């Protein structure tokens, strides 16, 4: 699956991964940040926490580890991570996910 071409005009997120690994499109408001992630290579993020996050998997697989338990999410599944909950993430290549963060500044934007 591909996202519509006009997503390419949206700002990207400034992530610690090159575009060959993850590409993003984002919409930010004072109320939060909506990010569209396209994962090109397997990605893992170590345990971390932040403000509230909700996400849904459009394609592929996202694995969240919370309190030592890993749960896998596939297409159509959604996850809700409350503020301050420590979690680790592993995402398979080919995944497209939409994440919504209550923190508008969760990730800095970078212009296209």
Image (tube, helix red, strand yellow):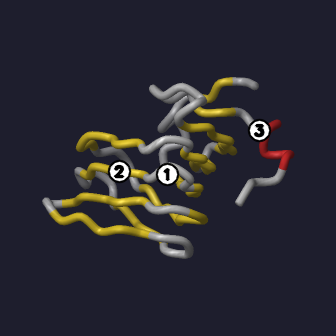
Q: Residue 63, located in which quarter of the rendered image?
A: bottom left
* Foreground disc of the pair 1, 2: 2
Front: mark 3 or 1: 3
Q: Secondary structure at mark 2?
A: strand
- Residue that numbered label 2 is attached to: 90
Residue located farthest toward the right when viewing the structure as drawn: 6
Mark 1 vs 2: CB contact within 8 A? no
Circle 2 Cα neighbour tier, 10 Å, few/some/many (<14 / 14–19 / ≥20): some
Q: In the rendering, which numbered label is found on residue 102?
A: 1
Between 11 and 70, the one nearer to me in the picture: 70
Q: Residues within 10 Å of mark 3 (few under 14, many from 20)?
A: some
Rendered residue at 50%/49% (across/down): 93
Q: Is residue 88 above or below residue 46?
A: below
Residue under label 3, please give it.
10
Q: Who comes first in sequence, dot 3 or dot 1?
A: 3
Residue 40's tag is none
Residue count near mark 1 (Cα–Cα under 10 Å), binned few <14, some 14–19, many ≥20: some
Residue plotted at (44% across, 53% down): 92
Label 1 secondary element: loop
Q: Earlier in the sequence, mark 1 or mark 2?
A: 2
Q: Position of residue 97 (x, y in %)?
A: 56, 57
Q: Whole-Å distance between the Cαs marked 3 and 1?
A: 19 Å
Quadrant (top left/top right/bottom left/bottom right) for the N terminus: bottom right
Residue 67 in percent (x, y) is at 15, 60
Q: Is residue 108 left or right of residue 62?
A: right
Q: Residue furthest left?
A: 68
Screen quadrant of the C terminus: top right
Q: CA distance from mark 2 to mark 3?
A: 25 Å
Comparing 20 with 32, the one in front is: 20
Look at the numbered disc 3 and give the secondary structure of its residue.
loop
**Does the residue at mark 3 contact the one at mark 1 (Cβ under 8 Å)?**
no
Q: Residue 104's image quarter? A: top right
């Amino acid at each position: 699956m591909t996202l519509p071409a006009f997503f390419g005009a949206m700002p990207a997120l400034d992530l610690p991964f090159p575009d060959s690994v993850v590409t993003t499109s984002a919409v930010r408001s004072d109320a939060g940040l909506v990010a569209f992630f396209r994962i090109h290579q397997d990605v893992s993020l170590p345990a971390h926490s932040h403000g509230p996050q909700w996400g849904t998997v459009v394609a592929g697989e996202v694995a969240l580890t919370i309190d030592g338990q890993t749960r896998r999410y596939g297409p159509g599944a959604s996850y809700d991570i409350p503020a301050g909950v420590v979690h680790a993430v592993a995402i398979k290549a080919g995944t497209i996910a939409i994440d919504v963060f209550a923190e508008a500044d969760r990730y800095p934007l970078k212009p296209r």
